[in-house]
Amino acid sequence: MRFHSTPIRSLVSALLVVFACASAQKAYGQVKESADAGGLVVSVGGFFSYYSVGYGPHRLAGFGGFVDAEPKGRPGVEAEIRDLNLLKPSDNVHVTTYLIGPRYGFHQIGRFQPYVKVLLGDGEFNFPYNYAHGSYFVTAPGGGVDYHLNRRVSLRLADVEYQDWPQFTFGNMSSFGVSTGLRIRIF
């Protein structure tokens, strides 16, 4: 079929140009940066913690570290170690926990990124005057907020945990603590 009429030829040409431009724009809008396309985000960090331990009137402080592994857009895993051995009372009570579990980071709001986690693991408890040392199962639901300074570095503004020690020697023990620190994205 031949088009002898110039208005039809002009209309078809114009439609082809519009379609080509619209398609190119749409394809351009779907392209992701290669550094952000899928994959796993792994971060490490350190923190300072202050805890109210449910064994007597003890308030303990200490340091810890964590590793987060999160597939983009899906729940990830957090592993942490915390050693509460600062501000030890004269009776030498101190606590160390080794926890791991699922972590979910919500969508970033500005530079803030809230998250929740449920960790499980081992808690080591040193009793007063080194009378005994016990190892117990610990559950620790919690959450917090990270503040992104740039693509790689975040401040862990607040990380709150409620620890439950259901098999503690003298019955169920619970602890509550707050941590703050630094998180660095490795890849």
Image: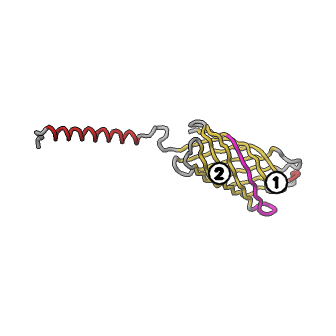
Query: Nearer the N terminus, badge 2 or badge 1?
Result: 1
Residue at image location 66% in from the left, 45% down from the top: 66
Q: Secondary structure at mark 1?
A: strand
Instruction: Give the residue at the far front of this rendering.
Output: 7
Residue at which label 2 appears: 143
Q: Secondary structure at mark 2?
A: strand
Q: To which quarter of the image does residue 55 belong?
A: bottom right
Q: Residues within 10 Å of mark 1 (few under 14, many from 20)?
A: few
Residue 65 image position (x, y, % from top left): 69, 43
In three-dimensional space, the C-alpha distance between marks 2 and 1, rounded to whole angstroms, equals: 29 Å
> Looking at this view, is 124 or 18 the one in front?
18
> Looking at this view, is 145 or 181 the one in front?
145
Residue at image location 55% in from the left, 43% down from the top: 41
In front of the other: label 2 or label 1? 2
Query: Where, quadrant-wise, is the C terminus in this rendering?
Result: top right
Which residue type carries mark 1?
His
Magenta stretch: includes residue 171: yes
Which residue type carries mark 2?
Gly
Query: Where, quadrant-wise, is the N terminus in this rendering?
Result: top left
Residue at image location 67% in from the left, 55% down from the top: 141
Main secondary-structure element of the magenta-colored stretch: strand
Residue 94 image position (x, y, % from top left): 81, 49
Residue 138 image position (x, y, % from top left): 71, 57
Q: To which quarter of the image does residue 15 belong?
A: top left
Task: Kindly indicate whether the residue at mark 1 contacts the one at mark 2 (C-beta within 8 angstroms).
Answer: no
Residue 131 image position (x, y, % from top left): 87, 54
Q: Which residues are magenta?
A: 167-181
Residue at which label 1 appears: 133
Coloration of the structure image:
secondary structure
> Looking at this view, is 63 or 131 the one in front?
63
